[in-house]
Amino acid sequence: MSESTGVTSHRGIPSGIVGVVESVLTTHMAAVGILDSQNYKLKHYAGEFLAEDNLNRLVADVSQFSYVMWDVEMIDETGENSDLTMAEDTFSLILFCCVSNRFSESSQWSSSYDLAWDVRRAFQGVSFDNVADIHSNGYFTPLSIERELHVPGMSVHTFRMDATIVHDVNGVTP
């Protein structure tokens, strides 16, 4: 078992790679200027928008900063090499682009849509390799943008993207 990833087998690695996905998302979005501590925040979000408690907390958070929140929707084992040591998994990600503007609802809606497009453009053609401690490489495939939610004080557009990752099932770079 790797101390840094907590991975013991191929079956356990997807949860270990979630941290890798978050690290790559954060690093890349900061590098292209989408994330900065003054305007935008990136956060893992595994909740349901329509639950009243979550929605109220989310509106309060987004009123201070625009957020890009992400979650893994599905992990699909798509392949492996002949000796079963290098697996290929596809992570279907959903990114919620949340913007608040209490003064103009149409500006709020267009701002969350624009943010979703900025994130989509940032990941078009992006690949990565040799992520720390996990011998892996991968690439992102941008998919669709959809209107998720529009309530007083907040607008959310979702952006779906796949991350295909080829990784060492032992989880550790020698």
Image: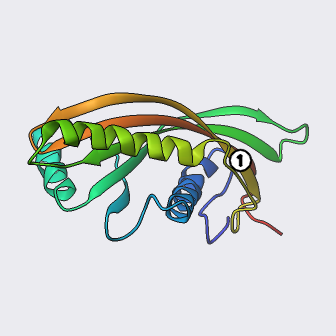
Examine the rendered structure and indicate whether residue 45 appears above or below residue 156. below
Residue 94 or residue 14, whichever sits in front: 94
Left or right: residue 94 versus residue 19 is left
**What's the residue at 18%, 35% (across, down)?**
106
What's the amino acid at mark 1?
Gly
Left or right: residue 74 versus residue 50 is right
Image quadrant where residue 154 sits: top left
Residue 95 visible to an observer of this rendering: no
Residue 173 visible to an observer of this rendering: yes
Residue 79 coordinates in the image, percent (x, y) = 77, 33
Left or right: residue 95 versus residue 53 is right
Residue 100 or residue 167, whichever sits in front: 100
Residue indicated by mark 1: 138
**Residue with the most extreme right position:** 82
Residue 88 coordinates in the image, percent (x, y) = 73, 40
Count of numbered circles in the view: 1
Image quadrant where residue 141 sits: top right
**What's the residue at 28%, 37% (across, down)?**
110
For the C terminus, the quadrant is: bottom right
**What's the residue at 86%, 39% (across, down)?**
81
Residue 91 coordinates in the image, percent (x, y) = 58, 39
Left or right: residue 58 versus residue 122 is left
For the N terminus, the quadrant is: bottom right
Examine the rendered structure and indicate whether residue 124 appears above or below residue 59. above
Residue 160 or residue 132, whichever sits in front: 160
**What's the residue at 42%, 44% (across, down)?**
71
Q: Secondary structure at mark 1?
A: strand
Residue 63 coordinates in the image, percent (x, y) = 16, 56
Question: In this figure, which colouring scheme has been used for the structure?
Answer: rainbow
User: Within 10 angstroms of label 1, few (less than 14), some, or many (20 or more) residues?
Assistant: some
